[in-house]
Amino acid sequence: MTDLLRLATAGSVDDGKSTLVGRLLYDTKSVLADQLEAVERASKSADGEPDLSLLVDGLRSEREQGITIDVAYRYFATPRRSFVLADTPGHVQYTRNTVTGASTAQLAVLLVDARHGVVEQTRRHAAVMALLRVPRLVLAVNKIDLVDYDEATYLTIAKEFRDHTAALGYGEDTVVTIPVSAKKGDNVVLASDRTPWYDGPTLLDHLESVPVDGPDDTAPFRFPVQTVIRPRSAEYPDYRGYAGLVAAGSVSVGDEVVVLPDGQRTTVEGIDRYTSALDSASAGDSVVLRLAHDLGIARGAVITAAGSAPDPVTEFTATLAWLHDKPLTPGRRLLVKHGTHTVQAMITAVEDRLDIQTLALDADPGTLEINDIGHVAITVAEPLPLDDYDTVAATGSFLVIDPQAGDTLAAGLVGRPLVTTPVDA
Amino acid sequence: MTATESGVELRSAASPAGTDQLDVLESEAIHVMREVAGEFDRPVILFSGGKDSMLLVHLAHKAFWPAPIPFPVLHVDTGHNFDEVIEFRDAVVERYGLTLEVASVQDYIDDGRLSERADGTRNPLQTTPLLDAIADHRHDAVFGGGRRDEERARAKERIFSLRTAFGAWEPSRQRPELWNLYNGRHKPGEHVRVFPLSNWTELDVWRYIQREEIDLPTIYYAHTRDVFARDGMWLTSGPWGGPRDGEEVITKSVRYRTVGDGSCTGAVESTATTLDEVLAEVRESRLTERGATRADDRLSEAAMEDRKKEGYF
């Protein structure tokens, strides 16, 4: 088990997400005295309690509007675990930030207001989490105090959420629902005696004890080359190493590897981590590989396990989450960044678009607009060694970039990783 | 501090090499630095001699070994320096064979391009020399030691942070940052600030300094110094000025948690002369390092946000 959990939070407007995150920080004593004083100075709450949402709403316009605009990262720790929390906005036009937070999360906490239950934003967020393969979900049914701690209300919401996430492919043991009041503190860090009918964990108990799904080192080995290290110094005249982060799987000295896209075969002669010579390295390790043959490898190549190397392709189907105000225009020249390789690309067709409410696919939408998720056909100028996102996420993901402005237009996932059973809206 | 003592001890004792949180953070930072080396033409490391910028140099050394660090370093010199820090800066440049670029706030004041503020603080004056140096050297990527745990506006910062041709940070133009795929595309004249330490906390930094036996300027450890109280901080006399009427000078055992412009960087009372003692203090601290030691961040609720928008670090 690893000691670091990366999680994302998402909720609809006014669900009290910033207050929940503030409560987690406050009750785990992660808030330092000067931060708390600043909040108390700025608090306008009528009841005299500090407005905990001010701990996390960092930008002036956020505080002025009382909403969270941009993804913020929070750090807290308990004796049992350290947490990196990506706090993502709930407002519909900021769903792109939910995608951002989800892309690195091992667990997502979704919030609903107990008075309103599961709403369209909840469905959208759950679909984004499913699409990006966030392994575990928590539904925090917030403001339970405002429905008088009513068990039936909670159970109805919990069942609706479970039905929805089951349709998205989540197994029962990967979804947990918890009745909380972020404002009053019920079941966030401390168990509440006002929900005697609830015998599950508090939110923090769950975050501390949930299994962490670490980088997948059982996947086939994938190593995008970032840069070539050639000191040509008196001490190391012939040193030639390929620097990168092990994206998936593991590699050992002596392993046979294939270098893509060209397909040359060679063996791993050495694995260096600074001055240490390692026997092996696995997903998440930044290392330098030395190979038995000088193959003229440059940045952009992918070193892969022999026997499981994907065939490089120039045409493929992908799922896009469109992130930019400017809608997709099929046929326009774009860039695709895959691993350490950026190539020219063109989206030749938009096959369908996901209806976030019903989880049905609408055929031939013609375009994708901001916050849309759909399937597209892509052609790239140079062959890319792609994996399906649901097989090897690290080499099944890519960015779509505007070549002129440089903006990131879309998050791309190779294949059709979103498995859904349409439900009645 | 966020972690309780037992928690930290548990982690460092129980985690074998290769799974420790510090290894995760180190691998991530090295990955970021190698992406910059691969995608940019003229990167530079902002180097103040402070602990976070020293960490950047150490990580760059590890990222490209046995080749030399492929980036020069840029020091924005306010002219209000601690002597120990300048000596340290020069020693680090020598040890790693670095090229040092200096942008001098004093030069700008001397020739009238900037004027001294009424409060004598020079931290806000660093922005213009910094942006000019970036433009003059045509730097397209600028490494900073900023961490998201430092301050609320920084918590929203990307690892690759696009700056306009005017050096400005525009929160609404921030690119979504997905997986570990960083987008460094920029137009001519724009540049990208890069923060490899984004996910580190102050405690992580100190634990890593201890693990890697990284040298720091001596003022990070407790020493005896003449100080005076202002705005709830212990400031020290220097070329930037000294106590005003009614501010009494006292000799105290202090250390610095951050290294910045001498006029506005406060010392904290401390007897921690060793790394172990500093770590113990950091764990128990009830103040953020900026709140405890930076007068400039107390100017307003949005002081850092405003300075970042103008092009500050």
Image: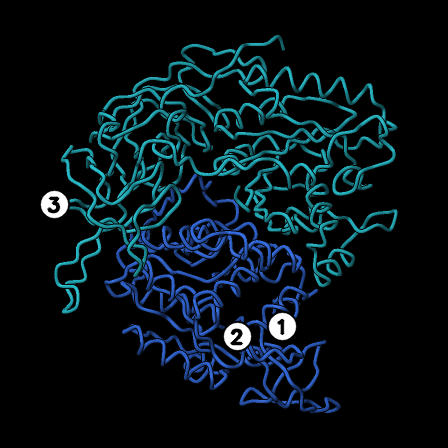
Chain colours: A cyan, B blue
Q: Residue at x 49, y 68 (%)?
A: B210
Res A349 quadrant in image: top left
Q: Indicate left or right for A231 with A172 as reference.
A: left
CA gap, disc 1 and disc 3: 54 Å
| Mark 1 vs 2: CB contact within 8 A | yes
Q: Indicate left or right for A42 with A253 as reference.
A: right
| Mark 1 vs 3: CB contact within 8 A | no
Residue matched to label 2: B260
Q: Is residue B283 above or below residue A407?
A: below
Residue matched to label 1: B293
CA gap, disc 2 and disc 3: 49 Å
- Can you tell which of label 2 and label 3 is closer to the viewer? 3
Q: Horizontal and vertical percent for residue B125?
A: 50, 73
Q: Mark 2: which secondary structure?
A: loop
Res B134 quadrant in image: bottom left
Res B251 quadrant in image: bottom right
Residue matched to label 3: A293
Q: Horizontal and vertical percent for residue A133?
A: 49, 28
Amino acid carrying mark 1 in the image: Thr
Q: Is residue A361 above or below residue A109?
A: above
